[in-house]
Image (spheres, rainbow, N blue to C red):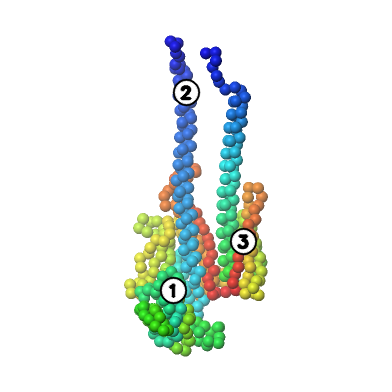
Amino acid sequence: MLNRRGFTLAELLIALVLFGIVSTAIYQVLVNNQRLYRQQTQRIELTDNIRSATAILQTDLRELNAADPLGSDIVEMTDSSLTYKAMRSLYVTCQPVSGGTVILDTTMIGLRGLDAEFDSLLVLADLNTQLASDDVWRHVNVTAVQRSTSCPSGQPSINVSVSPSIAGTDSALAGYPVRGFEVVDVRRYADASGAIWLGSRRYSKSTGWSALQPAVGPLATGGLRFTYFARDGSITSNRSLVARIGITVVGRTSQPVRLNDRTTGYLTDSLTTYVALRNNR
Amino acid sequence: MKHEGGFTIVEVVVAVLVLTVGLLGLASTAAVVTRMIAQGDRYTEASTLANRQLEVLRSQTCANLADGSATVGQFRLSWTVTSIAGGRGRQVTITVVSPTGRGTRTDTFYNTIVC
């Protein structure tokens, strides 16, 4: 045991150099992995964003009736903004409508109940009950919403005061549909820091437009584009002819990322969808 | 020091073989996963395009709906329209042919439009 040998200096040096080379390689792999991980996290957020933008807009816009002869559901349209009547609730009348009060069953289908500050009503007027072709939807303002028991045999009801009042000759009978809507505006806007967002705001009848709320973003420059198509597929600027709306969203990552070519920048991705509106074909 | 026990050559060869089989399995899994990701990518794009085309058809009068085809980038779309429910609806079949590394891939999407 006296002749125990250790490593020679040369062996040690070779071992150290090998160790150095191997650990540098491993380090490179780890750094690369981390860069890809960060990039991928941002990319996931980006695709999530543009998908939710189109999903949100699609659900709202699909309900629009641009061709309504008594007033298109599209209030104003440009290539970067859209003001429209957003359907929020569906009720059924439980008494024939005549005058300034619409009496509704308490059952509601939709996003939320009636709110006099924001909402208006569409009331189906049958007119000649023998004809379907003459039916129209009356647009009336909601001035008050009250819970009561005015349905047949004292059942609970929602009594809505409207203006203008609805004529008895409109034949809005019991069991007819009534839709509640509010006016909403979606647009592309830049915040104080210059980031571009898809923002939305709603119209209050007492205080006017609310402040723009960021809904989805950040977007790339020019990252929200609306295109309006008529029934025959041509582009139109006439609100009542719109049969289909094209939505293009170009999203941008919220953080700059290290790209594959070793530079730093934002990733962008885009998605174009179409929504066919109802009642316009 | 004469009875130092190492591995025999047979043991080493077996060990190397087992290791090789394992590594090859791992490598082929990676290849399969890469292919599946690319496939998912194409499928997403194909369904987005089919969905877009469906909205185009949906915004037209039923009487005007007809078979057709279009090319979007590297994707070829074709659609057929069949009258169903005594003319009260249309069955739409949209076929999307997408390019792949080894030829093409065809995805078919079905939907119904109420007239």
What chain letter is assigned to the residue under label 1?
A
Same-subunit check for callouts 3 and 1: no
* Residue beneath the point at 61% across and 27% down: B13
Q: Nearer the viewer, residue B86 or A243?
A: B86
Q: Which residue is mark 1?
A: A108
Q: Are marks 3 and 2 in contact (CB under 8 Å)?
A: no
Alpha carbon separation for disc pair 3 and 2: 61 Å
At label 2, counting other C-alpha atoms closer than 10 Å, the crowd grade (few under 14, some 14-19, many 20 or more) is: few
Tell me which residue sits at (41%, 70%) in the image: A112
Residue A244, x across and y down, in percent: 54, 69
Q: Residue furthest left?
A: A207
For image coordinates 50% across by 78% down, the residue present is A68
Q: Quadrant of the C terminus of chain A?
A: bottom right
- Which mark's residue is nearer the viewer, 1 or 2? 1
Q: Is residue A63 left or right of residue B115?
A: left
Q: Are marks 3 and 2 on the same chain?
A: no
Check disc 3 and report the residue beneath it.
B109
CB atoms of marks 1 and 2 within 8 Å: no
Name the amino acid type tagged 2. Ala
Q: Is residue B106 above or below residue A137?
A: above
Q: Quadrant of the N terminus of chain A?
A: top left
Residue denoted by label 2 = A15
Q: Residue at x 57, y 56 (%)?
A: B45
- Residue A55: x and y, percent? 49, 62
Image mark 3: chain: B
Please state the horizontal and vertical placement of residue A238, each as a whole percent of the image: 51, 73
Camera-nearest label, 3 or 1: 1
Determine whether B13 is above or below B74 in the image.
above
